[in-house]
Image (cartoon, rainbow, N blue to C red):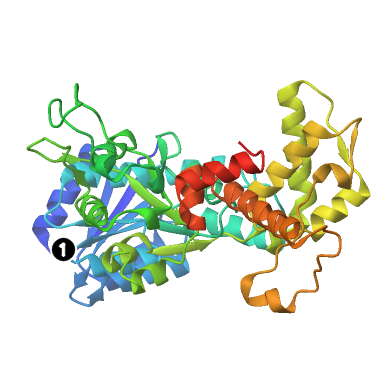
Amino acid sequence: MMKKRVLIVDDEPDIRELLSMTLEQMGLEVVTTAKLTKARKLLDSESFDLCLTDMNMPDGNGLELVDHVQACHPHLPIAMISAYGNMEVAVEALKKGAFDFISKPLELIRLRNIVQAALKLDQKDLENTSASTTLIGSSPAMEALKQQIRQVSRSQAPIFISGESGSGKELVARAIHGLGPRANEPFIPVNCGAIPSELMESEFFGHKKGSFTGAHKDKKGLFQAANGGTLLLDEVADLPLEMQVKLLRAIQEKSVRPVGAEDEIPVDVRILSATHKNLAKEVQSNQFRQDLFYRINVIELPVPSLRDRRDDIPQLADAFLKRFASECGQPTPTLSDEALQALLKHSFPGNIRELENTLERAFTLCHGSTIGSVDLQLHPEIPSVENSHRSNSTTEEFSSIDDYLATVEKDMLVAALEKNRWNKTATAKELGISFRQIRHKLKKFELD
């Protein structure tokens, strides 16, 4: 079996020797050069499985070599070696397509992790040629998204997944993880808005026994649980500012300190993050730290809303109904033409989650083997505040204005509940009412 080959590009003899010795001990064949011009010639004339390049070279900089590799050898992983603390260069390299980066002075454990992960890419490319196994849909918007997923899954760059609630951001994160070199390692999703602020540090970084009241034994945090794999920070915009500082340090230093511990623990985790909020606006309003924003938003991956991919609705509906039927051991019902048209015309402010909930309710309530438009029980469209004065809707079908307002209130409540996965606390916060009020309204509309 032929040895994997690695090209090392660095003008410091001591660094080249250290890298060569470490990689040769891993059973790899190593070729070294001290100049970019020679590196380009070697890359264009010979075959390599990985390239490691320093930033500052006598005849240029490593970013130029990253550009060359992306243009001429896009399947070759290239990692950047940067000076300690020079995160701007490292982030720029990741944006240009570098697989990962390592800072000087070199940490050999991290170096080996990077090399092992990079050398797994060829195998993953053979196993996965499409992300269609986890993402349903063949609309132009979805095909473009799948292509982006295939590209970003090869690198270790932090990815920010943006999109409306219910659009499938976690599924996108799982696809990135599943197509990358960490696929066989843990994928740990965490809803940042669901963790009480007083428990956040313990949840993320773990704690030692006796470090606080109730800490009866040592506990690993989410970073340690995801070690070697991927950590998804869902609804990252909901993190308190104090926790944002600690999270930034953990991401930059690639180590965590459990509550009550004296020493830090190194962790090897790829960070993906997601939120339905406009993170740039959160930064402008001082609700989100700018330095953390730049650190997690190296590459942004926007997920299209369901109304931007209506062609996928029939395929999604079919998949949902088959799953519901399989879980209940029943035949799969079909959608009538009227029901399908109703789905295609609906705006779905709750996106795929709303479609799934709508079909699950229809599946449960329908009689026979066909789902009609009545079974869908689609709520009437509620005009937005800014467009309400232009709305053509009337109150003629209601006996009183109170009945009309109650219907609007119930529709808004249901939409907010579905958007927040029926989390009462999150729904109350979004609607600007108290938890007691949300409980009263659920009882009033018989939704509890």
Relative horizontal placement of residue 292, taking residue 161 as reference (left or right): left
Residue at coordinates 86% horizontally, 50% vertically from top-left?
340
The kind of residue on which mark 1 rests is Gly
Relative horizontal placement of residue 323, taking residue 188 as reference (left or right): right
Locate residue 358: give its quadrant: top right
Mark 1, other Cα within 10 Å: few <14 / some 14–19 / many ≥20:
few
Q: Where residue 421 sits: x, y (%)?
A: 56, 44
In the rendered image of this protein, does residue 317 appear above or below residue 38?
above
Kindly tell me whether residue 173 is visible in this rendering.
no
| Front one among 28 and 350 | 350
Residue at coordinates 59% horizontally, 59% vertically from top-left?
145
Kindly tell me whether residue 109 is visible in this rendering.
yes
| Front one among 371 and 365 | 365
Q: Where residue 257 sits: x, y (%)?
A: 16, 41
Quadrant in which the C terminus is drawn: top right
- Total label count? 1
Q: Where residue 9 sits: x, y (%)?
A: 24, 62
Residue at coordinates 85% horizontally, 34% vertically from top-left?
366
Locate residue 228: give its quadrant: top left
Q: Which residue is mark 1?
A: 85
Q: Where residue 445 sits: x, y (%)?
A: 66, 43
Quadrant in which the N terminus is drawn: top left
| Front one among 402 and 370 | 402
Relative horizontal placement of residue 187, taking residue 335 as reference (left or right): left
Q: Classify mark 1: helix, strand or loop.
A: loop
Locate residue 39: give its quadrant: bottom left
In the rendered image of this protein, does residue 411 appear above or below residue 363?
below
